[in-house]
Each structure stands twice: as structure tokens, then as C-alpha cells.
Amino acid sequence: MPTTRQRFQITETDELAACLDKAALKWPDESRSKLLVRLAMAGAQTSLKSPMEEAFAFQMALDQMYRELGDSYHGVTLEDLRQDWPE
């Protein structure tokens, strides 16, 4: 298909094939080339977050964990947890 956009050629290594196989489980109706685009977009969204976005996502994950665990660990310090560890 004619285009003015740059094209890229990528060799499917064993590692890339494994990633594409996993992506195919999530998006089973996509071609491998479209899966590659999806993985690139998802990777960019994840790895190119600003420090503020990463901190917010981390805080949201902690909040979710606390909601799921309830008050099981509220106020418990690392030192408290280590008291039960074998020496």
C-alpha cells in the first residue's frame, strides 16, 4: 500500500515471538503485525509515564490493595512483620 510514512522491518526473534503469542491471547483476531503495533502502543503508555503518573498509579494500586485486604496490615511496620521471621 503506498504511503508517505516510514516503514520498519523487524525480525521475529524467539523473545518477540513469545510476546506476540501472549498478545494473541488478549487480541486473538489481530494479525501479528497489528499485535506488534498494539504492544508498541501499550509499552509506550506504560514505560513513558511521567514520575507523577507513576506515583499516582502506584498510589492507586496501594489503595486497591488496602481495600481488598481491609485493615489486616494497617499500621503494621516492617519491623513488626520481621518479628515472626526465623533468624
Image: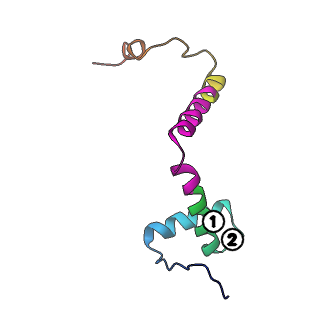
**Which amino acid does the dot numbered 1 rest on?**
Ala
Mark 1 or mark 2: which comes first in sequence?
Answer: 1
Residue 49 left/right relative to 86: right
Report the front residue among 32 and 45.
45
Disc 1 is placed on an element classified as helix
Q: Is residue 26 above or below residue 62?
A: below
Disc 2 is placed on an element classified as loop
Report the front residue among 41 and 67.
41
State which quarter of the image contains the N terminus.
bottom right
List x then y, in percent, for residue 86: 32, 19
Picture quadrant of residue 32: bottom right
Residue at figure coordinates x 66%, y 59% from the top left: 26
Report the front residue among 6 and 15.
6
Q: Which residue is mark 2?
A: 30
Q: Is residue 87 magenta?
A: no
Q: Which residue is mark 1?
A: 24
Q: Is residue 26 above or below residue 34?
A: above
Farthest left residue in view: 87
Tell me the magenta residue range: 43-63
- Say whether marks 1 and 2 touch (CB < 8 Å): yes
Residue 50 left/right relative to 2: left
Residue at figure coordinates x 55%, y 50% from the top left: 46
Question: Mark 1: few, some, or many residues within 10 Å (few <14, many ≥20)?
Answer: some
Q: Is residue 54 magenta?
A: yes
**Mark drawn on residue 63:** none
Residue at figure coordinates x 51%, y 50% from the top left: 47
Question: Mark 2: few, some, or many residues within 10 Å (few <14, many ≥20)?
Answer: some
